[in-house]
Image: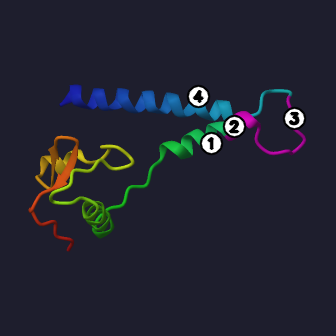
Amino acid sequence: MRDDLQALLDFHERAALHIRAVLKLLEPAAGQDNGGAGPSPATDSLADILKARVVARPRGKTGRAATAKLLEGFDLVTPRVPEHGAQGLSPLLRHGYLKWKRNGYVRTAKPFIVK
């Protein structure tokens, strides 16, 4: 148990180190005054990078409804590859809602129920 706690402590110390490094980047350099013009372009781009990495993922009924809508685009006979590629289709293949057939994915007869 002691090893687990030490590993957890090490993980959080590394995370705190990274957060401190980001905070240091966001501070204006000593002796530099941008005249109240707001953040520098470097901090703007850093903020954009951080925003881009945070992806809100729908949960619950919204997620299942979106999956049902995605599955509606597949036919039982005609194979199709979605415009966005196969990204996100693995769970549907694994659970038997889609099947790979020659040159695309087809919908199986397994019902997908949205509660």
Q: Is residue 93 left or right of residue 47?
A: left
Between label 2 and label 3, give the one nearer the viewer: 2
Q: CA distance from mark 4 to mark 3?
A: 21 Å
> Which range is magenta?
32-44
Do residues under tags 1 and 2 come within 8 Å of each other at their CB atoms? yes
Nearer to us in this view, 8 or 90: 90
Proximity of marks 4 and 3: CB atoms separated by less than 8 Å: no
The mark found on residue 47 in the picture is: 1
- Locate residue 56, reporting x and y percent: 43, 55
Sequence order check: which comes first, mark 1 or mark 4?
4
Which residue is labeled 2 in the image? 43
| Residue with the mark numbered 3 | 33
Which mark sits nearer the N-terminus, 4 or 2? 4
Residue in the image at 18% along x and 53% along y: 106
Q: Which residue is mark 4?
A: 21
> Residue at position x 15%, y 60% from top?
76
Residue 34 inside the magenta-drawn segment: yes
Q: Residues within 10 Å of mark 2 (few under 14, many from 20)?
A: some
Verify CB contact (< 8 Å) between mark 2 and mark 3: no
Mark nearer the N terminus (4 vs 3): 4
Is label 4 or label 2 in front?
A: 2
Q: CA distance from mark 1 to mark 2?
A: 6 Å
Residue 38 in the image, given as x and y percentages of width and height: 80, 45
Total marks placed: 4
User: Which residue ends up furthest to the front in the rendered image?
Assistant: 78
As displayed, is residue 28 above or below residue 37?
above
**Could you tell me the amino acid type at mark 4?**
Ala
Which quadrant would the C terminus be assigned to in this image?
Answer: bottom left
In primary-sequence order, the first of circles 3 and 1 is: 3
